[in-house]
């Protein structure tokens, strides 16, 4: 999903030499919204927003809705204020995953060197597929047509000499287009962009660079690297200077595994009671742990996300001594971080937990966790959670949930399973 700023000047023909441009970036256009339009064609041409109507945020918006300033991650209330006539569609994540899997399988039939980076985008290195399938633009055109025929949705394709250029090219090909940037046109292409288009240049970095008189990639490239190091730091300065000159050595990594697993939830009404927030955090930790176990992964880092009533988002993270897939461990760490968050007296709108730094469980040492000095029963907890996984697999996710205290007490704390009708 491409969110960086664009420059109209780069949406042009940069040449036809494809010999040094073998990296493709494939990006679905307004993916969630496009999937919904494919099965609801009567909504085509209308502003459509995917998300929860009452308290949710925008997950995706059609280009007709974007014309009114509606953007992903915007609150639904703000989106509807900008575009009152928008049609709000509740998300169907199971369908999105199904379409995503199908598209990724199509990419895998082109080349084994596919790096999926999200549900709706991936990089391909087609150097080894050229003899069989033709030049990169022919491969991209065939892929776009196949996706359209199979699912009734569109994708945009960028072709360049590395991942940086391919990603930027697909951004400027949107919607439903393809842009080739020949290797010898790379620097000229980049120099036409605003500095915020580069990876690693968020709002804060963009503001810092602007104070140094740097607002375009051309100005960034022409700035002495020592000046950039003084402006944004030694490592970041050198990295951004390399990007400005089109230097991106990262290869397309085939079969890259998921880097994190998370879950978050928006409350129906802003919540001030921390115990209510903690109970929701417990449910989310349970969901994350179940997904980790399903994928036979463990997480080394636990991250907490809290959004207050004024839409300020706060994040905290902590690295564990031992990776885990146990919900109780995830929850204990997340709740401890929650206690330390300064909410400035504001209620909580959204809370989320994420396991990061994933690695396969097989081969990972499962020595006692950092909590074992207080409670030696984390192994028993995991056994209980695995048993719950089996029940859910057979009877559905709503059949059973884990019950546990919202805080640790001295001595063993049992983990119980209880019937539930809606928490999963």
Image (cartoon, rainbow, N blue to C red):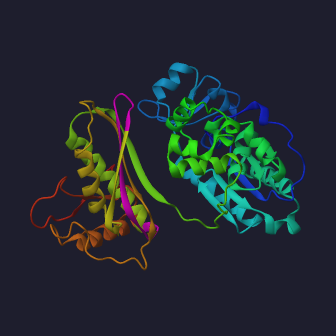
Q: Quadrant of residue 402?
A: bottom left
299 magenta-colored: yes
201 magenta-colored: no
Where is residue 124 shown, x and y percent of the image? Answer: 72, 60
Asked whether, in this view, residue 359 is left or right of residue 215, the answer is left
Q: Main structural element of the magenta stretch: helix, strand or loop?
A: strand
Q: Which quarter shows the N terminus?
A: top right
Residue 30 seen in render? no
Q: How many marks?
A: 0
Q: Is residue 155 above or below residue 18?
A: above
Q: Between residues 346 and 90, which one lies in front from this camera angle?
A: 346
Where is residue 8 shown, x and y percent of the image? Answer: 76, 31
Seen at 63% across and 28% down, the residue is: 66
Q: Is residue 12 above or below residue 318?
A: above
Q: Between residues 42 and 180, which one lies in front from this camera angle?
A: 180
Seen at 36% across and 27% down, the residue is: 310
Q: Between residues 256 and 206, which one lies in front from this camera angle?
A: 206
Asked whether, in this view, residue 250 is left or right of residue 152, the answer is left
| Extent of the magenta region | 294-313
Residue 415 seen in render? yes
Q: Quadrant of residue 179?
A: top right
Asked whether, in this view, residue 404 is left or right of residue 185, the answer is left
Seen at 88% across and 68% down, the residue is: 131
Where is residue 366 shown, x and y percent of the image? Answer: 32, 76
Q: Between residues 196 and 5, which one lies in front from this camera angle?
A: 196
Where is residue 346 shown, x and y percent of the image? Answer: 27, 30
């Amino acid at each position: 999903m491409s969110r960086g700023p664009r420059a109209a000047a780069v949406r042009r023909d940069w040449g036809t030499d494809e010999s040094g441009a073998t990296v493709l970036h494939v990006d679905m256009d307004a993916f969630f919204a496009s999937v919904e339009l494919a099965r609801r064609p009567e909504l085509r041409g209308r502003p459509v927003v995917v998300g929860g109507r009452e308290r949710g945020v925008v997950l995706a918006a059609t280009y007709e809705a974007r014309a009114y300033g509606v953007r992903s991650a915007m609150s639904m209330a703000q989106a509807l204020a900008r575009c009152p006539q928008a049609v709000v569609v509740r998300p169907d994540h199971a369908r999105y995953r199904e379409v995503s899997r199908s598209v990724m399988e199509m990419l895998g039939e082109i080349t084994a060197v596919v790096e999926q980076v999200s549900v709706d985008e991936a990089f391909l290195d087609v150097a080894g597929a050229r003899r069989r399938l033709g030049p990169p633009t022919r491969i991209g055109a065939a892929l776009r047509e196949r996706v359209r025929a199979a699912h009734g949705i569109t994708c945009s394709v960028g072709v360049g000499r590395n991942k940086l250029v391919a990603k930027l090219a697909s951004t400027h090909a949107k919607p439903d287009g393809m842009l080739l940037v020949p290797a010898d046109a790379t620097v000229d292409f980049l120099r036409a962009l605003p500095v915020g288009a580069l990876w690693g240049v968020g709002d804060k970095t963009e503001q810092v660079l602007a104070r140094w008189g740097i607002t375009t990639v051309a100005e960034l490239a022409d700035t002495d690297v020592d000046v950039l190091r003084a402006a944004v730091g030694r490592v970041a300065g050198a990295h951004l200077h390399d990007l400005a000159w089109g230097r991106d050595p990262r290869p397309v990594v085939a079969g890259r595994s998921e880097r994190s697993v998370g879950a978050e939830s928006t409350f129906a009404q802003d919540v001030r009671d921390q115990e209510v927030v903690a109970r929701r955090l417990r449910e989310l930790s349970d969901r994350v742990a179940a997904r980790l176990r399903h994928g036979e992964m463990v997480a080394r880092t636990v991250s907490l996300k809290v959004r207050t009533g004024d839409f300020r988002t706060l994040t905290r993270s902590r690295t564990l001594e031992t990776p885990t897939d146990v919900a109780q461990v995830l929850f204990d760490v997340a709740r401890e971080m929650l206690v330390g968050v300064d909410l400035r007296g504001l209620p909580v709108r959204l809370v989320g937990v994420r396991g990061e730094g994933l690695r396969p469980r097989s081969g990972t040492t499962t020595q006692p966790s950092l909590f074992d000095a207080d409670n030696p029963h984390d192994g028993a907890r995991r056994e209980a959670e695995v048993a719950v996984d089996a029940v859910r697999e057979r009877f559905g996710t709503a059949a059973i949930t884990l019950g546990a205290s919202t805080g640790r007490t001295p001595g063993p704390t049992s983990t119980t399973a209880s019937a539930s009708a809606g928490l999963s």
